Amino acid sequence: MKRRRVKVLLTGIGGGGHGEQILKALRLGELEYDIVGTDMSDACANRHLVDKFVRLPRATDPAYLDELRSLAQSEKCVAIFHGSEPEMAVMSRSRAALEADGFYVPVNPPSVLDICQDKTKTMAHLASCGFPTPKFREVRDLSDLDDWSVLPAILKPAVGGGGSANVFIVQSTEELLTFSRYLLGICPSFTIQEYIGSSEDEYTVGVLFGADGVLINSIAIKRVINNALTIRAQVPNRTGRSEFGARLVVSTGISQGHVANWPSVRSACEKIAESLSPKAPVNVQCRVADGVVIPFEINPRFSGTTSLRAMAGYNEPDVLIRRDVFGETIPERFPYKEMMILRGLEEHLVG
């Protein structure tokens, strides 16, 4: 029997994002959760998995914050979890007001979001702190590429581009110019990054911080990138460099793989995350090349693998509620299980 019944509000439960992941993790928690779930659309596959479903406006709607606060107050929720990046940004800016209303809101400060939601700023921050990074550059005009000679490379929008959208692998100058013209036609700038390592050595690493900024624990999943769910883009390796493997790969935001200790990876990513001074979960994407952990992206939020971690006994939303809301002492470096977790599709009858 679970120890306590708690009501929480969780936004963005549809769309396969981190809101859905938090929902699944809460259902595996040590506490019993009454979940008020929201989404911007009634066509929400997960609405039957929450105790109450409410449609809210888009996060960009001026009425969004007031409706969010009113709903959480009327339902007597103790905490509000964001389930999408636009809602994360609103809650980050409004955290003080939401906490004044009595809600626990596990979200990172705007200073963390400002760095991590801009891929060029992320790389610049890491480099300034002395961490190894791929070679990188912000591109606002084709002339910014005149002296770029590092190939293969990854091109991706500096801001936005969730789920690895509009990300391209280039291996030649011709490909570089072709895809650069395309990206500059749809966004004001993009980031070019050196392609590093092999997709066989890619990790997604969660580093968990409490509301007080204290590091609680970390977890690493060595990704298995092998199907349409996990591969965003792939091309045959024509570089002649065997260290990249037979194909050059960009993964999606849908991760699966081997949960284990991976101590050197975890240690490196903890230091990376701590450099941001976060107050909520941080997720570091990295590859290991020549024994060096090289980060290529940071998500300042709960991960797309939150439910997988919970299956292994590393339940971030549940731990934070127990620690930061109810004052429970969480053992330092609490143990979790090693396991392989793979993913598929699941259908929901909603009509």
Image (cartoon, grey):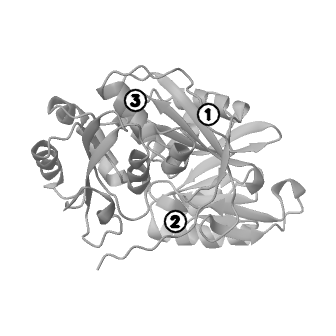
Q: Secondary structure at mark 1?
A: helix
Percent position of residue 63, x then y: 13, 55
Position of 143 with respect to 348 (left or right) is right
Q: Establish if 197 lies above or below 274.
A: below
Residue type at mark 3: give it.
Lys
The residue that disc 3 covers is 279
Q: Position of residue 138 (x, y in %)?
A: 55, 51
Q: Residues within 10 Å of mark 3 (few under 14, many from 20)?
A: many
Q: Of callouts 3 and 1, which one flags the residue occurring earlier in the amino acid sequence?
A: 1
Horizontal side of 129 relative to 39 (left or right) equals right
Describe the element under mark 2 as helix, strand or loop: loop
Where residue 57 appears, as percent x and y from the top left, is 19, 61
Q: What number of labels is visible?
A: 3
Residue at image position (70%, 54%) is: 148
Looking at the image, tell me whether mark 2 or mark 1 is earlier in sequence order: 2
User: Which residue, given by chain and number where applicable, does mark 2 sit on?
Assistant: 165
Q: CA distance from mark 3 to mark 1?
A: 16 Å
From where the camera sits, is residue 258 visible? no
Vertical placement of 149 versus 297: above or below?
below
Categorize mark 2 by other alpha carbons within 10 Å: few (<14), some (14-19), many (20+): some
Q: Of 15 and 60, which appears nearest the observer? A: 15
Residue most extreme to the bottom = 351
Q: Earlier in the sequence, mark 3 or mark 2?
A: 2
Mark 1 = which residue?
A: 269
